[in-house]
Amino acid sequence: MNLRRRASTDAELDITSFMSLMTILVPVLLLNMVFSHISVLKLNLPGLSEASASAQENRQLEVVLRHDHIDINYPAGMRVKRIPNKNGQPDFSTMSNVLQEVKRQLAEKSIEKKDLVILSEVHTPYKTLVKAMDTARSYRAVVAASVVDAELFPQISLGDAPAATQLVQTAAGQ
């Protein structure tokens, strides 16, 4: 009985290709995490009570987005400023300046106002609506040699803009 035992050798695992994959995959995944984040915009819905609606309507600050201009109204229905579009795009920098002036004038009268209603037409692009919300929420200010976001009107409600013919009828009726 001459049995020969085969010499068993331990197999070596070649994980070089796996390590190369991980070396590339981990930094790529980490970089993508920085760019993929979710922004949440807090919105307020108007109250259901008619009494509170009529009381609030007189002191409501409105931004009405139209296809060719932006109207800023305070109190509701009383135009403060009409801002025409520049180069076919809404002029959000002028809108920010007007809202800052409204905020300053309200502060001089000791009125602390944080809410605003954005009324938009039916076919207003989503990007325009979000830009209007960001513009109404805060503005860039320089404080002690640093740029900070100063608060304007952080409590934003959304609604449908009245038809242009309704506005003409209301003005003619008054």
Image (cartoon, grey):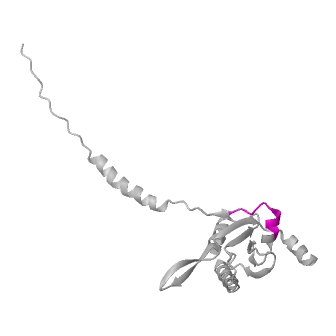
Residue 53 in percent (x, y) is at 80, 66
- The tally of labels here is 0
- Residue displayed at 40% across by 58% down: 30
In the rendered image, residue 106 lying in the magenta stretch gets the answer no
Q: Is residue 157 left or right of residue 32?
A: right
- Residue displayed at 83% across by 68% down: 163
- Residue displayed at 75% across by 77% down: 71
Which quarter of the figure has residue 85?
bottom right
Which quarter of the figure has residue 27?
bottom left
Which quarter of the figure has residue 14?
top left
Residue toward you, 104 or 49 = 49
User: Which portion, as a residue range, is magenta?
Assistant: 44-54
Q: Is residue 147 left or right of residue 96?
A: left
Residue toward you, 138 or 19 = 138
Residue 109 in the image: above or below residue 128: below
Specify whether residue 124 is in view. no
Residue 166 in percent (x, y) is at 87, 70
Farthest residue in the right direction? 173
Q: Quadrant of the N terminus?
A: top left
Farthest residue in the top direction? 1
Q: Quadrant of the C terminus?
A: bottom right
Residue 153 in the image: above or below residue 18: below
Residue toward you, 118 or 32 = 118
Specify whether residue 16 is in view. yes
Q: Is residue 144 left or right of residue 5?
A: right
Q: Is residue 16 left or right of residue 91?
A: left
In the rendered image, residue 52 lying in the magenta stretch gets the answer yes
Residue 33 in percent (x, y) is at 45, 58
Residue 166 in the image: above or below residue 101: above
Farthest residue in the left direction? 2
